[in-house]
Amino acid sequence: MKLQTVKFGEIEIEESRIFDFVMPIIGFDELKKFVILDPNPDTMFKWLQSIEDPTLSFPIISVSALDYDYSINLSDSVVNDLEITNPESLLVMNITSIPQDNPKGTTINLLAPIIFNLDNHTAGQIVLSGSGYSISHPMFKNI
């Protein structure tokens, strides 16, 4: 399928790569279909592009690629909503905020990761209540 986006222009994606957000991204409850784009494989950053809104894309990163002490526990309701049967089929990504005028000021939302079930292509953003994680954790230390 062809998808017209503001950030990446017209792109072609396989419909099998589209994730159904059964637990919406906070503040974007009406948007349910997203795809992960990897326009620059030389970086850790990927993009979560809305299928329904061509203007909306989020820079995302897998915290597992960074040297952070980060762990999450999924509630039974999350496991049920995402129909998780195999923990190895999960991909955990976090939305980042990259200031245009200062990329070294990039922050990561550790409080509300996005969980992708690669087996059935469902996904959802969860809030790790009581975890002590921040929505704007600095990505670069000592800068």
Image: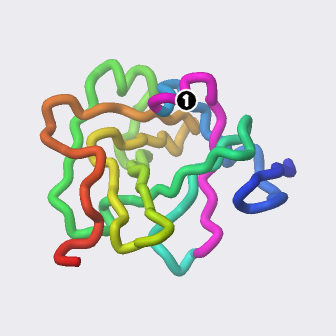
Residue at the outermost front position = 101
Query: Which residue is pictured at 36% across the width and 32% down the height?
Result: 126
Q: Position of residue 120 (x, y in %)?
A: 56, 36
Colouring scheme applied when the structure was drawn: rainbow
| Residue 130 in which image quadrant | top left
Query: Which residue is pictured at 58% across the width and 38% down the height?
Result: 121
Q: Is residue 13 magenta?
A: no
Location of residue 58 with respect to 40 vertically, above or below: above
Q: Residues within 10 Å of mark 1 (few under 14, many from 20)?
A: few
| Residue 104 in which image quadrant | bottom left
First to last magenta residue range: 26-40
Most common SS among magenta residues: loop
Q: Position of residue 140 (x, y in %)?
A: 27, 72
Query: Which residue is pictured at 20% across the width and 48% down the height?
Result: 71
- Mark 1: which secondary structure? loop
Q: Nearer the viewer, residue 50 or 80?
A: 50
Query: Which residue is pictured at 47% across the width and 71% down the height?
Result: 101
Q: Position of residue 97 (x, y in %)?
A: 42, 56
Location of residue 26 with respect to 68 vertically, above or below: above
* Amino acid type at image mark 1: Phe
Location of residue 12 with respect to 110 vertically, above or below: below
Q: Mark 1 points at which residue?
A: 28
Q: Where is residue 100 in the image (x, y as percent from the top left)?
A: 50, 67
How many marks do you count on the picture?
Answer: 1
